[in-house]
Each structure stands twice: as C-alpha cells, then as structure tokens.
Amino acid sequence: MERIKSLLFIDVGIFVIAALASFLKEDFMLIIDIIGCTGLIFVVTAGILAGSFVRGDRIRANYDPEEEERKQKNRLSENLFFVGLFNIVISIFAYELTKQGFAVMN
C-alpha cells in the first residue's frame, strides 16, 4: 500500500507541473501532451531496465549480477512501468473527455 501511495504522489507531481506549464502557456491541451510523453518515457525506461529490448544472450548476461541488485532493478522497473502506464491512461482519458467536450460545444 505504501508503494502505491508513493507512485500516486509522483503522478500528482507530474500532473501539477503539467497543469502549471499549460496554465502559463494558456494551452490546456498541453497537459495531455506532457502527461502522455512522460508516461511514454517512463514505460520505455522501464523496458530498458527490465532488459525487454535485448536479445537472448544479453538477457543471460544481465541475469548474471547478484540477486539483490537484480531484484532492486526489477522493482524500479515495475514502479516506472506503473507510473508510465497510469500517465498514459490519464492522458487518453483526458483526450477523450476534451474531444467530447469540444464536440458538445460545436
């Protein structure tokens, strides 16, 4: 439960920064762009840390380090993936809401 709270705290921080940037630029669609891009960055970083983008011989070499180091890297990779996934879902949800909102206004 503590892990989920800390991950949500990171997401709230990203949202506050995105909202502040979009308010200063007076472009509220910028929130969707910032949250979506940060989500994509987190997911790609998680994939790199997990070794998802390498061949089999590299996976064996990456599996060689000490067990504690590997567990720590996997835990960090999971956390980054969940933060990124949550940001992407929020970005898609916000896009759909704004698209429907603009359709109603026209």
Image (cartoon, rainbow, N blue to C red):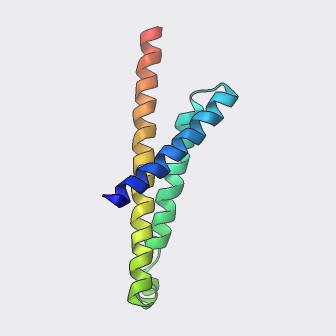
Residue 60, position as x, y percentages in the image: 41, 88
How many numbered circles does the render carry? 0
Quarter of the N terminus within the rendering: bottom left
Q: Residue at x 39, y 43 (%)?
A: 89
Quadrant in which residue 31 is drawn: top right
Where 23 falls versus 92 (above or below)? above
Q: Check the image and name the residue furthest to the right.
A: 25
Quadrant in which residue 82 is drawn: bottom left
Where 18 falls versus 84 (above or below)? above
Q: Residue at x 50, y 57 (%)?
A: 42
- Nearest the eye: 90 or 96: 90
Query: Does residue 51 appear in the picture of this structure?
Result: no
- Nearest the eye: 43 or 7: 7
Q: Check the image and name the residue furthest to the left.
A: 1
Query: Does residue 11 appear in the picture of this structure?
Result: yes
Residue 22, position as x, y percentages in the image: 62, 32
Q: Residue at x 45, y 53 (%)?
A: 84
Q: Check the image and name the residue furthest to the top.
A: 106
- Nearest the eye: 59 or 55: 59
- Nearest the eye: 10 or 28: 10
Where 23 falls versus 82 (above or below)? above
Residue 46, position as x, y percentages in the image: 46, 65
Where 21 falls versus 37 (above or below)? above
